[in-house]
Each structure stands twice: as C-alpha cells, then as structure tokens.
Amino acid sequence: MMKPIATDTADFSSLRKDGCVYVDKTMYMHRLISTKGSKLVFASRPRRFGKSLTISVLKAIFQGRRELFDGLYIDKTSWAWEKYPVIHFEFNDVDTASLERFDESFAFHVQDRLEKSGYIYNNSISPSANFGMAIESLSAANGGNGVVILIDEYDAPIGHTLDNIEVAEAVRARLSALYSQMKNRTGDIRFMLMTGVSKFTKLSVFSALNNIVDISQDDDYATMFGYTEEELSQFFEEHLRDHAAKMGKSYEDYRGQLKKWYNGFRFAKNIPTTVYNPISVAYTLFRKEPYFSATWATTGRPSMLMNYLKREDVLKVDPEAIRGVSDDEFDVAELRNLKPIAMLFQSGYLTVKDYDPITQSYTLGVPDEEVRRDLCTLMAGVAAKETVAWASSLGKKLLTGCWDDFFEGLKSLYAAMAYGPTEKRIHENSYGRCLSFLLASQGFEFTMEAVSANGRADIIARHPAMVCIFELKVDEPVDSAFKQIREKGYAEPYRAETRPVWLIALSFDSKTRELVDFGVERF
C-alpha cells in the first residue's frame, strides 16, 4: 500500500505519526548540528521549499524525540538525543496590515513562543528584552548547556510590507532589535537556524553576529532542500508509476516530462545537481491529474515579490538568459534600491544555470516549465498594469479563438505599456517581447524571428491546440503583414499540420506606440 502524501502540513511529528511520505534529510541536519564552528546558521530558499518542515525536524531532534526518527539516517548515528529548551518563532503569519497591528501581533507572537519554551514572560519590558532574558534563563535552567533558537521566515514581515517602504523599514527596525539580543549571548546558544526567502543584510542579525554561517549556496547543503532525482525514485516510486499509468505515458517519458515541469532549481556554484520543488511534487502526486500543471503558484505568490512589482518595472529583464551576474547583485540590503534580478532570484523565479569560476559570475535562468508559465503570466499582467488573472484570461482567449476579445485585450496591454524616453523608435521586437510573455504563460513554445527558407517570421508559436504565426508591423497596414507571410512562405512548413494554423497580423503606431489594427486568417 502506498504511503499517503501530505500537502497541508509541515509538522514533522504529524507526518511520522500518520505514516506519510517523508524524504529523509536528516543526514544534512546531523551534519549541520554536529559541525564545530557552525552553531549559528542562516539558510534562504524560495517559498514552499521545505524550510518550515526542516525547522520542525530540528525541533524534534533537540526535544529528544527519538521515536519519531526510527529508520531515518540520524537514528543510525551516535547522536546523544539530549533535550534542550527550544525557542521557535514563525513570523510568516504576523499581522502587517499596519505598523500598529504589526506591533501588537509581533508582541503577542514573541510572548506566546517564549512562554511555550518554558520562560516566564515579563510584561514590564519589551518583547526584544524578554527574548534576551529568555536565552539567559533557559540556558541556565539547562545547566548552562545552551538554548536552541529556530526562526522560520525571519524576513516575512518585511516582505509583506515592501509596497510601503516607510513601514517596511520600521518593521525591519523592530526585528533588528529582537535579533540583536543574540549578539552578546552566543555562549548561551547551543544552535540557531534562521530561514527566509531573502538575506536582508542590513538586519542586525547579520551585522552583529559576524560568525553566522550562511549555507544558502554552500556545496555541502545544495540538496538539503528540494528533492533530487534519486530521492524521488527512492521515496515516491509507487506514486510515480501510478501517475504515469493514469496519464497513459511510458514511465521513461513520464519522468522526462515531470523533470521538465518541476526540476530545475540549483542552489550552489560548484554543484550542478538540480532539485524538484517539494510542494510541486506533493500536489502533483497527490492529485494525479491526467496532465501536468502549475501547482506552486496555486499555493500563493510570494508577497515580497508581488509588493515589489507594485512599484518597480521588471520587464527589461530577460528571464531566460541572464549572464555575468556577480554575488553583489543578489544583495537586498537597501529596501529603497532593490534590484529585479535579486528579487526574482530569491523568490524562486530565477535560479543558477551555470557559474564561471574565472570571471566569478553566474548565468541565471528560469528553473522549470511551471515557474516559466507563472512568471510570464505575472509579467504580462505587470506590462498591462492589470491583475495576473487578467493576463491569464487573455491567454485563454487566444487558445479558444475568441479573436475579438483577444485583440481588444492586446490593445489594452500595449496601451498600458511604458517605454523609456530615450527610445526614438520602437522596433517590432519591442512589441514582440511583451507578446512572448503572454504566449509562454499559456504553454506555447515559440521562436522569435523564426528562420525559414525565405526570411524570418516575427514569432512562430506552437501549442498542442494550435500554431500561430505572428507578423508585427510598425506604421504599416495589416495587409502588408499578411502579404509578407504569404510571399515568404512562413506557414509552408506547417501545411501538413493537423492542428489549426493561424496567421495573425498586428499593426502599431510609432507615435502613440499602441496597437491600432489587427487581423487573423486560418491557413
């Protein structure tokens, strides 16, 4: 009988008691908590990548709950299973609707978690001061052997408020006051792990704790979060074969498609191994639908990125191939000067594709098909200054041949787009780039300036439902676009297609930079 797959909990105890699938990562945790000189640790990963479950596993280890680890790697080691007082913060759910509500929610959360660790809270002093006192008193009560501190999503309140920089900076100041309590108390800390999406280097925890170890891109922990191909086979084999059968695919073809959709995240310079997004695997194998689909986005988009997009333009970033990126470009120190590449990378929309040790620079790209579609939907919405749902709906109009609605939506999209004042003339490629986001969001495979025997078509887009050949003109009528498609024979390679082949002409005005005319013909 197949073990059940949990999609609604990151609580290690519940997973084990319910007999659910757990991909054994305790080898990494044993290494982490046993290595001398690394008792203060930071790890960043994108949203829904197993950070909370990792915190839960470590909590159970330090609480001495050996019965939960039967058969796992750490149970076969010499780990002593001593019990430690554990302070466990989870800041993702702290209310950030206003600074006042944050202060209230933050204070309540700190008090609740300190009391659960065994500390007697003192309401006459601040939450931060209470944290400092808790470290000292709990360590003393433990015979001076230290306290364990686990901080999940340490940066979430900042990310939630990035659409209001004044509030974000005030929130950062409150968090800094809390984290700074660890500075002069490292002797009372047995182990500390802090996880988050971004590394806000101006937070006091990074400036005050100069001995904190950042394992975010450490080779030894490159696959600590996420699932490798080997782990997928070891822990999900029955589920995988069952899903392949339901999809009517051979197992080999199924695994290849699964990898294309969900495996592409790389977290180390020198280790080329890529991993699957855990939540994508869980949802896909739990539902076992007869097709692959975007699952990560259905669990919610990262508020940090969405709030950033409200005030920044990321449309100049080509997410498919970003070369020459230095370590400095990942820095998110200044809240008022965040960079698109850093935001997209840390929120999981970009990942490491390669690293050149000679130039000490990265090549970044979109991890997998799931992320590609969501990012392109998101960017199409940003381009049109509309919601992501609007951009997705526009793509569906194309797929279903609702041409009038599709072209009206395109007009709105291009009318909303902004171009820099230095651009004297907008080339067809500039308009095509925005259209490419929309196409990619709906699963089209497309080629811009597709070469044929007689020339280059602006865009040829292929989908299981159709083939679309786009010709874009600036200050020329759509008739000239159709004439070029026919004379150059752009559609000839698709004459034997069983799918419908559509010829689509778009005409733009160079003065208004808007879509002014359009047409569609069946080939």
Image: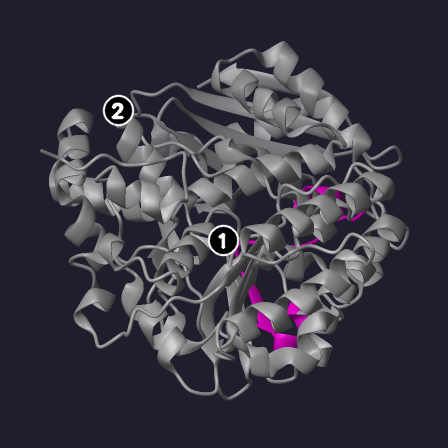
As drawn, the label of residue 46 is: none
**Nearer to me, 300 or 73:** 73
The C terminus: image quadrant: top left
* Region of the chain picked out in magenta, as a range: 305-330
As drawn, the label of residue 290 is: 2
The N terminus: image quadrant: top left
**Residue 206: which quarter of the image?**
bottom right
| 43 horizontally vs 385: left or right | left
Q: Is residue 237 magenta?
A: no
**Nearer to me, 120 or 373:** 120
Instruction: Using the rendered image of the protein, determine whether residue 332 is visible from the camera's viewpoint.
Output: yes
Q: Residue at x 64, y 68 (%)?
A: 330
Q: Secondary structure at mark 2?
A: loop
Instruction: Using the rendered image of the protein, determine whether residue 427 is visible from the camera's viewpoint.
Output: no
Horizontal and vertical percent for residue 446?
47, 40
**Residue 29: which quarter of the image?**
bottom left
As drawn, the label of residue 366 is: 1
Q: CA distance from mark 2 to mark 1?
A: 25 Å
Nearer-N-terminus badge (2/1): 2
| 68 horizontally vs 428: left or right | left
**Residue 80: which quarter of the image?**
bottom left
Q: Is residue 325 magenta?
A: yes
* In the rendered image, the vertical position of residue 300 relative to residue 188, given as above or below: above
Q: Are marks 2 and 1 in contact (CB under 8 Å)?
A: no
